[in-house]
C-alpha cells in the first residue's frame, strides 16, 4: 500500500462527488448568515441543495416574497462564495 500525506488524502476524499455534495450542503448552512444577513438567516428554517437547486424553507410570507425577487443575487453570491457553479435555481418553500 502506498503512503500518502494526510492533506493529500483529505483532498482526494473532498474531490469525490458524493462526499463533495454533502460537504457543500453543510457549508451553505454555515455561511448563509454571512451571505444573506442575520435577519434572513434568523427566519430561514431550512436550506438544502439538491441537484444544483437551492431549497429555502421559511414560514414568513414577506420573506418569501423578498427572496423571490433576490433569486439571481442569491445564485450569484453562493456560486461566488464557493468558486464554482453550485446553484442554478432557487426554490422558496
Image (cartoon, helix red, strand yellow):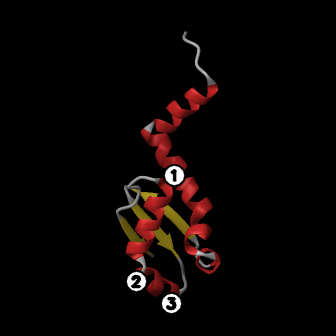
Neighbor class of circle 3 (other Cα within 10 Å; few <14, some 14-19, many 20+) is: few
Sequence order check, earlier mark of 3 and 1: 1
Q: Residue at x 42, y 57 (%)?
A: 50
Horizontal placement of 29 versus 78: left or right? right
Percent coordinates x, y for residue 1 in the rendering: 55, 9
**Residue picked out by circle 3:** 62
| Placement of 5 over or under 20, stated as above or below | above
Number of marks present in the image shown:
3
How far is mark 1 from mark 2, CA to CA?
24 Å
Above or below residue 91? Residue 63 is: below
Q: Nearer the viewer, residue 4 or 43?
A: 4
Tell me the quarter of the picture where residue 27 sits. Answer: bottom right
Q: Residue at x 51, y 48 (%)?
A: 22
Q: Which mark is residue 78?
A: none
- Crowding near pointer 2: few (<14 within 10 Å), some, many (20+)? few
* SS label for mark 3: helix
Where does label 1 land, which residue? 24
Relative image position of residue 61 (x, y in whole percent): 50, 88
Amino acid at each position: 500500500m502506498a503512503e500518502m500525506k494526510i492533506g493529500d488524502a483529505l483532498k482526494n476524499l473532498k474531490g469525490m462527488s458524493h462526499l463533495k455534495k454533502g460537504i457543500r450542503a453543510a457549508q451553505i448552512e454555515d455561511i448563509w448568515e454571512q451571505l444573506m444577513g442575520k435577519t434572513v438567516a434568523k427566519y430561514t428554517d431550512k436550506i438544502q441543495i439538491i441537484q444544483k437547486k437551492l431549497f429555502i424553507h421559511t414560514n414568513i410570507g414577506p420573506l418569501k416574497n423578498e427572496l423571490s425577487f433576490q433569486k439571481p443575487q442569491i445564485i450569484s453570491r453562493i456560486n461566488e462564495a464557493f468558486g464554482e457553479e453550485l446553484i442554478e435555481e432557487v426554490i422558496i418553500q
